[in-house]
Amino acid sequence: MSVMDVVGLVKRFGGAVRVGPLLRAGATEHAVRAAVRSQDLVQPRRGVVALPAANPAVVAARINGGALSCVSAAGHHRLWVLHPASHVHIRCPRGLGLPGVVIHRGPEQEYPFLPMAGLIDTLVDAVHCLPEPDSLVLLQSAIGQGSTTAAFLRTKLTGNRNGKARKLLDYTTPRADSVPEILARRLLVDSGYGFESHVWIPGIGEVDFLVEGFLVIEIDGEQHWEKKQFKKDRRRDNHATVGGYKVLRFVYDDVVYRPEDALRLIAAALSGRAIPF
């Protein structure tokens, strides 16, 4: 086997791999040593080889003998993320405790070749590790894309230890169109107000939320600032107002970083009272 053949195999393993699995996949010790001498591969730790530009998270997973999980595996599973990972999260039976690495104890059961934990393990690790808003976003993302269901996840989150995790599933819904919409729904559930999601109102169209039957709440993403969409939104708001509805629009920062202010505005709109600014 040539050096380039070995490099190709390492690429299939995600850019980094332990030597044992590499040899079992068909590489020879001679070709591996030659690739290291030519600097086509590097050895970040004894028994591990990697491409020089390999993803550091993948390298950390290989060194620890585990698989990426929690928020570090979110991209692989096409899950939305509220805050990017500040540490590498790895699922493995044991780990080396390297700086910047969070170890989730458990069998890794990784995908063939790629050091990625399965979706359910990734979600279970997330609800035990991340702040509630972050783990809720991952849960809802998986449920919304049809990869799992809240009912199935409940079977994986039994016992007293998982009480808070099961509570997060109460916030989920079969459909959510964005990260801020997920957090806005959580806000409304906690508020105790009666509301519906994705309601079709004749003459207006589908709205994100209808609260207490007359307050329309829209969650605006970046696309709402495009000229065409901006005009459409203004027309919809006008039709809603003359139809007897009140309208509030919130953006990402409102529901992620200032939820108390958003709730205060909702309460004021529902009560019909003015609030000082």
Image (spheres, helix red, strand yellow):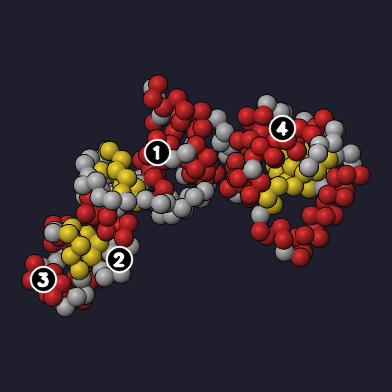
Where is mark 4, residue-wise?
195
Q: Say whether marks 2 and 1 touch (CB < 8 Å).
A: no
Q: Earlier in the sequence, mark 4 or mark 2?
A: 2
Where is mark 3, residue-wise?
33
Q: Which mark is residue 54?
A: 2
Residue type at mark 3: give it: Arg
Give me the C-alpha separation between circle 2 and circle 1. 26 Å
Viewer-side residue, 270 vs 33? 270
Is residue 139 among what the camera can see?
no
Residue 34 falls in which quadrant of the image? bottom left
Q: Earlier in the sequence, mark 2 or mark 1?
A: 2
Give me the C-alpha separation between circle 4 and circle 2. 47 Å
Residue type at mark 2: give it: Ala
Residue at the location (72% across, 61% down)?
Answer: 225
Q: Alpha-carbon neighbours of circle 2 within 10 Å: few (<14), some, or many (≥20)?
A: some
Q: Which element is circle 2 on?
A: loop
Image quarter of the N terminus = bottom left
Give me the C-alpha separation between circle 2 and circle 3. 18 Å
Q: Earlier in the sequence, mark 3 or mark 4?
A: 3
Where is mark 1, residue-wise?
129
| Residue farthest along the top direction in this orientation | 160
Q: Which element is circle 1 on?
A: helix
Residue type at mark 1: give it: Cys
Image quarter of the C terminus = top right
Q: Alpha-carbon neighbours of circle 3 within 10 Å: few (<14), some, or many (≥20)?
A: some
